[in-house]
């Protein structure tokens, strides 16, 4: 049932809060060097009086706002953010920059109603670009506007604090707060530095134009969308499937399990790797605030996972609590967590049961024509199975199944009567495979996940089936088959 509700850490009080529990941290000097911001913060020209005007920040395509469970208006949130900052300045004897940094690692705030997916990150990246151009005043202006609109965006608060501090002193570390404050925050500061790194790294290493993840060998036109997740880059990619093939339409920062990936057992706090499908769309009203704008459960453990003895369940795509914009790269109990505006876009877009979700350590991006060639031998095996079933030869059909085949809780001998009944009902008529999709997974065993409608000639409809195939030597064999609709 997803992750249990957890209280925010006691180190997070006042302004943006993330339930930060990542076990990894990266030294500030390393992060700063990779981000390339420190020399620019310290550059005297950074706070210069005259700067060229910067272009407006890129924003994601706007869409109708989903219903929000927060009643405060944008005006109220911005006013509250400003009031909170002024109050902090009066009660804590710190410079404005240090105050913003303190708010970043110790704050709480409510999320902004009507926020557009992808917008906050795009605006943060624009601030980075302005810093890179030594346009300090414009960067500060954009950062101040960003934290006013998204007071729960903790990373933005940290960048804003550094920009404020750079006006009066050199910044020698990303997230330049006093040591005592950093120590009191525990893992929060290093996690924010890591989040900054992975966001920038994913954008610098964007997929080559016109390529797709290698797992998507063939998608039926009725499968209108697909999702691929690169856990190494902490990135989710959303695709639209149309007459010309897959097209990348959006990508988002995500968090995975505290202990990383490759889930094997219940409670190991790891995110599974494999080919999954969205099984349902949970009503936000039925969920605790911890899960944010909603949840999309996945079919973990799938038949391949079960064949490997993997246990556990409740792996969802879900959002963040109302006082958190995002979480550390490794912060969940195994679920994939997105910012609420990003999750809302996905919920509005994808289809239950038909949308595939590939979760990989690192996605391999390839030209679409190359995956067609790789799928040729499998499609030949699939069509051979179809022809054998059409022929009515039970023994010939059984030759396509592994000895350890399962149909949910049935073994091959227990399921064989069902197969014989299906063959008998067809009465030698041709069997067609409608709306065929198949995806490849290889983690030591070359596997295919095929979904199709099995329709007997003369019939208008038939059962929707899903098969899992594994390559054994030069042959493809079925180790799971079941009706899913």
Image (tube, grey):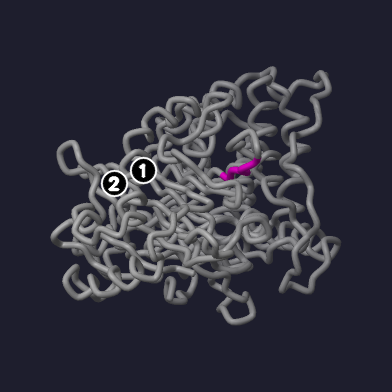
Residue at position x 19%, y 68% in the image? 412
Percent position of residue 8, x then y: 49, 70
| Residue under numbered circle 2 | 447
Residue at position x 64%, y 50% in the image? 100
Q: Is residue 261 above or below residue 9?
A: above
Q: Is residue 393 above or below residue 50?
A: below
Q: Which mark is residue 62?
A: none
Q: Nearer the viewer, residue 360 or 42?
A: 360
Stretch of the chain drawn in magenta: 238-242
Q: CA distance from mark 1 to mark 2?
A: 6 Å
Query: Which quarter of the figure is the N terminus placed in?
Result: bottom left
Left or right of 425? Residue 133 is right
Q: Are marks 1 and 2 in contact (CB under 8 Å)?
A: yes
Q: Secondary structure at mark 1?
A: strand
Q: Is residue 4 above or below residue 482?
A: below
Task: Say few, some or many: other residues with alpha carbon within 10 Å of mark 2 (under 14 / 14 to 19 / 20 or more).
Answer: many
């Amino acid at each position: 049932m997803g992750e249990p509700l957890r209280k925010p850490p006691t180190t997070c009080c006042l302004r943006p809060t993330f339930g930060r529990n990542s076990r990894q941290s990266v030294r500030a000097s390393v992060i700063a060097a990779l981000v390339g911001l420190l020399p620019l913060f310290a550059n005297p020209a950074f706070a210069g009086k005259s700067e060229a005007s910067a272009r407006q920040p890129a924003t994601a395509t706007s869409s109708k706002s989903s219903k929000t469970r927060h009643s405060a208006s944008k005006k109220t949130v911005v006013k509250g953010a400003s009031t909170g900052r002024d109050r902090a300045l009066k009660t804590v004897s710190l410079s404005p920059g240090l105050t913003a940094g303190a708010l970043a690692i110790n704050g709480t705030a409510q999320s902004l109603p009507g926020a557009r997916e992808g917008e906050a990150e795009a605006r943060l990246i624009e601030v980075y670009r302005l810093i890179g151009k030594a346009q300090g005043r414009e960067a500060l202006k954009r950062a101040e506007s960003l934290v006013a609109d998204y007071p729960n965006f903790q990373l933005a608060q940290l960048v804003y604090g550094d920009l404020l501090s750079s006006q009066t002193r050199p910044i020698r570390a990303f997230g330049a707060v006093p040591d005592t404050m950093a120590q009191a925050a525990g893992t929060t500061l290093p996690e924010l530095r890591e989040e900054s790194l992975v966001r920038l790294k994913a954008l610098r290493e964007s997929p080559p134009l016109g390529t797709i993840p290698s797992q998507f060998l063939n998608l039926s036109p009725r499968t209108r969308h697909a999702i691929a997740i690169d856990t190494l880059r902490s990135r989710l990619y959303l695709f639209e499937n149309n007459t010309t093939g897959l097209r990348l339409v959006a990508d988002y920062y995500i968090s995975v399990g505290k202990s990383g990936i490759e889930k094997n057992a219940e409670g190991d706090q790891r995110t599974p790797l494999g080919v999954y499908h969205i099984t349902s769309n949970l009503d936000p009203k039925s969920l605790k605030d911890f899960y944010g704008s909603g949840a999309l459960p996945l079919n973990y453990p799938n038949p391949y996972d079960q064949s490997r003895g993997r246990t556990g369940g409740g792996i969802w795509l879900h959002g963040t609590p109302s006082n958190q914009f995002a979480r550390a790269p490794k912060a969940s109990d195994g679920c994939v967590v997105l910012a609420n505006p990003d999750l809302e876009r996905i919920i509005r877009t994808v289809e239950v049961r038909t949308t595939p979700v590939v979760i990989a350590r690192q996605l391999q991006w390839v030209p679409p024509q190359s995956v067609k060639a790789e799928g040729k031998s499998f499609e030949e095996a699939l069509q051979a199975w179809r022809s054998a079933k059409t022929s009515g030869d039970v023994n010939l059909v059984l030759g396509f199944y592994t000895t350890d085949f399962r149909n949910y809780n049935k073994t091959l001998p227990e399921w064989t009567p069902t197969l014989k009944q299906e063959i008998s009902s067809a009465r030698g008529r041709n069997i067609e495979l409608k709306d065929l999709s198949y995806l490849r997974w290889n983690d030591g065993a070359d596997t295919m996940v095929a979904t199709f409608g099995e329709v007997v000639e003369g019939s208008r409809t038939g059962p929707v089936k899903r098969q899992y195939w594994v390559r054994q030597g030069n042959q493809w064999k079925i180790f799971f088959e079941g009706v899913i609709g």
